Amino acid sequence: MDNRPIGVFDSGMGGLTTVREMAKQMPNETVIYFGDTGRVPYGSRSHDTIVKYARQDVAFLRTFDLKAIVIACGTVSSAALSEISAEQDIPVFGVVGPTALRAAEVTRNNRIGLIATKATVGTGAYERVMRHANPMAEIYSLACPLFVPLVENGRTCPGDVVIETVVKDYLTPMKEAGVDTLVLGCTHYPLLTEVIQNFMGPEVTLLDSGAEVVRQVRSRLHASNQEADPDRKGYYRWYVSDSTENFSELASRFLGRPVTEPVSQVAIERY
């Protein structure tokens, strides 16, 4: 047993969908979450800037006695996972590997779609893993830059003409290509699952990158006997780099529950 917390970070709020999955799959674990809300988005930044920001995020999280770190950000997982992981003495998990492997396994017609930020798509990280696991796969990748701001402004529900129009505009080429598996390669995107599924159709499998990485973390902790005591209930601590004023309201959308725990602001540039 190991009751130390797990550190989770993202460029903003999207990583909370990963925390939501952790609460479902690993309810006994304690989570320290940092959202770099003052510098979001990372998706349009250069590689060097992404690595710099990720190192600062990790340095803050390491002020706690953690047993693992989850990079709940497709951009950082694609661009900086190998560098960050090599610098740490605890396991570091990214969302790309487990999700890409799952996509390669579940596709029925070998046509896989990937939607993510510009930076994530630009690295080719998902594509490399999927092609290695399934050389027959045809992969269709697309950056969807409007999804993140729309999600953070609450435009996520079926019937909202704005998000439905944007989804149709972005995803029509995916639908026409006949993909049967679609990777939601940004942790904001699971909040659009219903709208995306309605457009793509029930025959298309959507893969939530947060859910896939949580399965990997749970399996690894179980194998190394580092799971939390099953008789305890996990708790959550929230940290952001910008104002805490609206965090609870917005975070509640991502987590699917009211946020009652305290929220603290961090001067992340100091790390």
Image (cartoon, grey):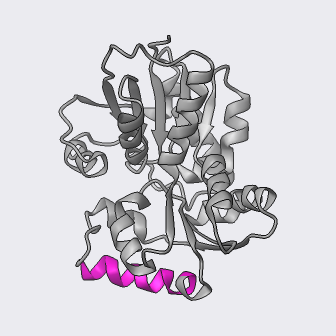
* Magenta highlight on residue 170: yes
Q: Quadrant of residue 233?
A: top left
Image coords of residue 78 (percent x, y): 65, 51
- Residue drawn at (46%, 17%), measured in percent from left and top? 64
Q: Main secondary structure of the magenta part?
A: helix
Image coords of residue 197 (percent x, y): 40, 72
* Magenta highlight on residue 117: no
- Residue drawn at (47%, 56%), measured in percent from left and top? 41
Q: Residue furthest top?
A: 1
Q: Is residue 60 left or right of residue 155?
A: right
Residue 239 appearing in the image: yes
Q: Nearer the viewer, residue 195 or 203?
A: 203
- Residue drawn at (59%, 77%), measured in percent from left and top? 179
Which residues, given as a range, are shown in magenta? 160-174
Residue 241 appearing in the image: no
Q: Is residue 216 left or right of residue 245?
A: right
Q: Is residue 83 left or right of residue 142?
A: right
Q: Nearer the viewer, residue 118 or 253?
A: 253
Q: Is residue 10 left or right of residue 222?
A: left
- Residue drawn at (59%, 47%), measured in percent from left and top? 76
Q: Is residue 250 above or below residue 139?
A: above
Image coords of residue 37 (percent x, y): 38, 46
